[in-house]
Amino acid sequence: MASTSAVAERIGVIPSALSPTRQSLIEKGIIYAERRGYVSFNVPNMDRFVVRQVHLDD
């Protein structure tokens, strides 16, 4: 689970800028709204996969 504000800070945007992307990821079934202001991945270990992809660019 991650807060929307933490995700926004990590990628360097304001939290409201994430709204369209957040909604799109929810509609695609990739994430879900755990509770207000927080999201989680639907796929187990997806967070690890994403981190590995980021490190491939290094």
Image (spheres, rainbow, N blue to C red):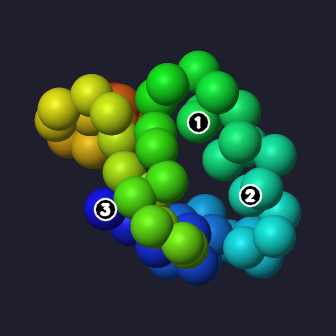
- Going by the numbered disc 2, the residue's amino acid type is Leu
Helix, strand or loop at mark 1: helix
Q: Nearer the viewer, mark 2 or mark 3?
A: 3
Whether residue 17 is visible here, answered yes or no, is yes
Residue 20's x, y, as percent?
Answer: 81, 46
Label 2 and label 3: CA atoms lie apart by 16 Å
Residue ID at (66%, 47%): 22
- Going by the numbered disc 1, the residue's amino acid type is Ile
Q: Which residue is mark 3?
A: 1
Helix, strand or loop at mark 2: helix
Q: Is residue 16 above or below residue 21?
A: below
> Is 23 displayed left or right of 17 in the figure?
left
Residue 15's x, y, as percent?
Answer: 72, 73
Q: How busy is the neighbourhood of tag 3: few (under 14 within 10 Å), some, or many (20 plus)? A: few
Q: Is residue 15 above or below residue 46?
A: below
Q: Which residue is mark 2?
A: 18
Label 3 and label 1: CA atoms lie apart by 14 Å
